Amino acid sequence: MTLQQKFKELENEGSALLATNFYNFETITGVLQAASAKEMPLILQASPSTINYLGAGVAASLARSTMKKHGVEGWLHLDHAESYELIEECLDEGFDSVMIDASEKSFDENVAITSRVTELARSYGANVEAELGYVAKLGQSHEREGFTKPDEARKFVEQTGVDALAVAIGSAHGFYKKEPDLDLERLEQIHRATSCALVLHGGSGIPDTQLQQGIRLGIRKINVATEIKNIFMKTLQEELQQNTEIDLRKVFPPATEKINHLVQGKMAIIKGAKTA
Ligand code: 13P
Ligand code: ZN
Ligand code: NA
């Protein structure tokens, strides 16, 4: 099943996919252990800095081989790409999905850049995600003016033909200084105005109930990166303080296990959205 088809299915079910960022073998293993235990499909995503670290080919083959190993259905996605060339490279390596992030450009430029990517991705049968409005990046302030306007979203989706749209409704990348308060009314309006899958970026730190309300009002993909990175590194740092182990294969598993636990929790929240 393509991711585009999966999104249609999720729309009918009123459910969402968890999209987790990975950085190396250990982090991808943790999320796949969780998906396997919960018997849930998911999106594995790599950012440009991860592609820079692993290489597009290694990221693709790592994702393919580990999904197979764990018996998990999943799609490989390029997260927050700003370069057409990087998108093309990842599509050539067999990525199922790409995000073009031109959210800091004007509406017209965003439409033009995104349309070019949609055209390219079509020839690969790949899914395309874009961003309209502005979800604060790590270390940036959370500005309300950047929120997605429902009417613009409708025009944007019609003009670009994207399959998925990242919306700015009050979430932000990284942890929050104070509890986020998602603009769910706006989300509902965007959902009514558009026909594509809506994506919630900045998933780390959002309370469970708001995630579930988001799904009920149209979110089909929830991105989580920071909580995964954080729990992995915190656990690893503790491990390394406690022992002088030089067999690195013994150092990583406790950190991987913490990711497994964390991701199972996120998946339970998504599952709970349908009935709660
Ligand atoms: P967090 O940094 O809040 O986990 O957001 C992840 C994300 O949106 C990746 O694209
Ligand atoms: Zn993001
Ligand atoms: Na966040």
Image (cartoon, rainbow, N blue to C red):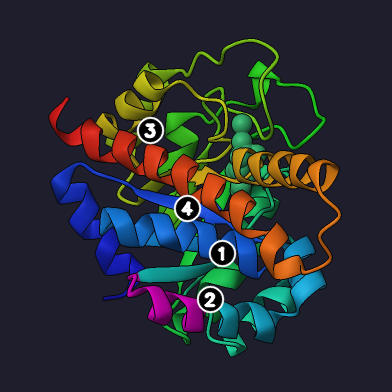
Taking depth in this image into account, of 21 and 228 the one nearest to the observer is 228
Between the C-alphas of marks 2 and 3, the distance is 32 Å
Which quadrant of the frame does ligand 3 lie within? top right
Between the C-alphas of marks 1 and 2, the distance is 8 Å
Between the C-alphas of marks 4 and 2, the distance is 13 Å
Contact? badges 4 and 1 (CB < 8 Å):
no
Residues in magenta? Answer: 63-73
Which residue is pictured at 76% across the width and 39% down the height? Answer: 238
Q: Give how far across and how far down residue 145 sits, in percent.
A: 66, 20
Amino acid of disc 2 = Ala
Whether ligand 1 has any atom under 8 Å from the Cβ at mark 4 is answered as yes
Q: Residues within 10 Å of mark 3 (few under 14, many from 20)?
A: many
Q: Which residue is mark 2?
A: 63
Between the C-alphas of marks 4 and 1, the distance is 12 Å
Amino acid of disc 3 = Ile
Q: Name which of mark 3 and mark 1 comes first in the sequence.
A: 1
Which numbered disc, 4 or 2, marks the residue closer to the eye? 2
- Label ID, residue 182: none
Between the C-alphas of marks 3 and 1, the distance is 32 Å
Helix, strand, or loop for circle 2? helix
- Place residue 52 in its image quadrant: bottom right
Which numbered disc, 4 or 1, marks the residue closer to the eye? 1
Q: Which residue is mark 1?
A: 28
Q: Which residue is mark 3?
A: 190
For residue 163, above or below residue 179: below
Which numbered disc, 3 or 1, marks the residue closer to the eye? 1
Farthest residue in the top direction? 178
Q: Which residue is mark 4?
A: 19
Q: Give how far across and how far down residue 70 sits, in percent.
A: 38, 73
